[in-house]
């Protein structure tokens, strides 16, 4: 038997309803903030991610699903959403319209990682990207959207923020990091040794135990910020305080992707085992230019929906969602089955899901089936019911019965909707 690939999940009926509820809740909240959906290709040129996400990131160095297509072009399944959105904004000249431009996406992403709880190779993200606003007010508004989504879902999360500076103050910080890690370079893993000269910031999020031990005492970004970046951070805090959003400043957050500048942030959930990042994001003011577009500041985040779902389950926050029909129409004979089909279609016009026998089961088997699918009511149609135009509607939970007029669909709908 062919089985699903390692690190992928099947979301089955019974679970998919909860996913739909989660996604609808998220989309409704994004609409309140004025965000519009953008739908993009699942694969892009590998070059986009190498330049966008960054050659020294774990994602590009170790995790991309890349292949050559039949025309020998290097193609990559998207490992994240930001680079593709930026590509599309440039390609479709969206930067010439009204600013800011707030966009959201619901996508699956692909990273070749070691699968474990909350970490898979194909995973789902809800992400937002907002372009054209450089003020800390934009950072706060984006963070507030993430915060409101978790509130609406009923999840408790904590927010951690940091600033990783800009292209003016970063070189000084890089030098401090370089000097610090150079002193212990013999113990760094091969990947980090390579990063030492290229981008020592990346060593800070290496998962190897030795590198992370040294990373714990490394120089902190916040101590090297230029006055503009420091002021940006202070103003962001003021906005978050005004919004009543609690946060802690965590100087260790540097994010795993290379495009960030200034503000970076993560929402952490304690519901899924040890502290887990359920959502991460930040500002990327240089990325649009880096990918060949105009100067256009940007900020966004992405939440890992597989993790959000795990947290919702663990916290007992998933609502009861029933897909059971309101009515099961059992029938005896071909004429009655035809009528039951007609009634089920007529009830749909009243927004009611009524199910009928499509298999040709015996009456006993039909009633067993009605019970199994959890129908709230049942009715049996046979020749005598068709002749009389009347039938008996039974409440499946308490057995209570009442006579109904088969032709009066509106009256039947009112009973079922009550
Ligand atoms: P990221 O931190 O790489 O950021 O991913 C965002 C979220 O996706 C993570 O916090 C996590 O919840 C989830 N995630 C990442 N990898 C996996 C995985 N292998 N399995 C399950 N969940 C995972 C980005 O992707 C940026 N594009 C976010 C962003 C948008 N920054 C600015 N705009």
Image (cartoon, helix red, strand yellow):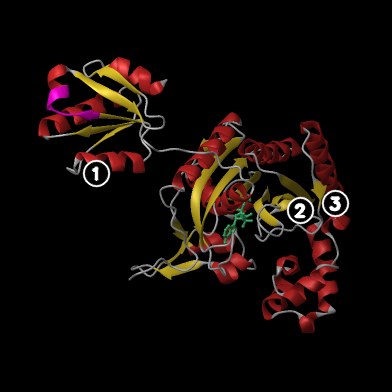
**Going by the picture, which residue comes out furthest to the bottom?**
186
- Total numbered badges shown on the rendered structure: 3
Quickly name the residue at label 1. 365
Crowding at mark 2 (Cα within 10 Å: few <14, some 14-19, many 20+): some
Q: Where is ligand 1, by quadrant?
A: bottom right
Mark sitting on residue 166 = 2
In the image, the segment drawn in magenta is 380-385
Q: Is mark 3 within 8 Å of ligand 1?
A: no
Q: Quadrant of the N terminus?
A: bottom left
Reading the chain from its start, which is encountered first: label 3 or label 1?
3
Reading the chain from its start, which is encountered first: label 3 or label 2?
2
Measured in 3D between alpha carbons, the distance from the residue under mark 1 to the one under mark 2, in whole angstroms, is 70 Å
Quickly name the residue at label 3. 226
Whether residue 385 appears in this view of the structure is yes
Crowding at mark 3 (Cα within 10 Å: few <14, some 14-19, many 20+): some
Can you say whether 7 is above or below 148 in the image?
Answer: below
Q: Do labels 3 and 2 touch, CB within 8 Å?
A: yes
């Amino acid at each position: 038997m062919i089985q699903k690939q390692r690190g992928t999940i099947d979301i089955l009926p019974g679970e998919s309803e909860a996913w739909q509820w989660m996604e609808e809740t998220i989309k409704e909240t994004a609409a309140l903030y004025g965000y519009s959906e953008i739908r993009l290709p699942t694969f892009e040129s590998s070059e986009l991610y190498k330049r966008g996400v960054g050659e020294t990131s774990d994602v590009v160095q170790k995790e991309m699903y890349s292949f050559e297509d039949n025309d020998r072009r290097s193609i990559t399944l998207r490992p994240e959403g930001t680079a593709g959105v930026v590509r599309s904004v440039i390609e479709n000249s969206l930067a010439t319209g009204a600013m800011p431009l707030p966009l959201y996406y619901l996508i699956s992403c692909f990273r070749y990682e070691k699968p474990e709880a909350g970490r898979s190779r194909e995973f789902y993200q809800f992400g937002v990207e907002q372009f054209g606003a450089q003020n800390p007010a934009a950072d706060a508004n984006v963070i507030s959207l993430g915060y409101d989504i978790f509130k609406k879902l009923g999840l408790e999360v904590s927010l951690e923020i940091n600033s990783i500076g800009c292209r003016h103050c970063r070189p000084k910080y890089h030098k401090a990091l370089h000097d610090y890690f150079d002193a212990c370079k013999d113990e760094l893993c091969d990947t980090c040794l390579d990063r030492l000269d290229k981008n020592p910031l990346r060593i800070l999020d290496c998962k190897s135990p030795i590198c992370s031990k040294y990373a714990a005492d490394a120089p902190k970004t916040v101590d090297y910020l230029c006055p503009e970046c420091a002021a940006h951070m202070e103003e962001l805090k003021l906005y978050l305080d005004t919004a009543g959003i609690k946060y802690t400043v965590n100087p260790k957050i540097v994010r795993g992707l290379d495009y960030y500048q200034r503000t970076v942030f993560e929402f952490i959930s304690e519901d899924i085992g040890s502290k887990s990042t359920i959502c991460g994001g930040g500002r990327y003011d240089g990325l649009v230019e880096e990918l060949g577009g105009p100067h256009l500041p940007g900020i966004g985040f992405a939440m890992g929906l597989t993790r959000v779902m795990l947290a919702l389950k663990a916290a007992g926050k998933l609502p009861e969602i029933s897909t059971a029909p309101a009515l099961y129409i059992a029938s005896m004979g071909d004429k009655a089955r035809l009528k039951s089909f007609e009634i089920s279609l007529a009830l749909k016009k009243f927004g009611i899901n009524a199910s009928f026998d499509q298999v040709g089961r015996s009456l006993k088997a039909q009633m067993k089936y009605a019970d199994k699918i959890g129908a709230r009511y049942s009715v049996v149609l046979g020749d005598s019911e068709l002749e009389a135009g009347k039938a008996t509607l039974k409440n499946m939970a308490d057995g209570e019965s009442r006579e109904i007029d088969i032709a009066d669909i509106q009256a039947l709908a009112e009973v079922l909707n009550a």
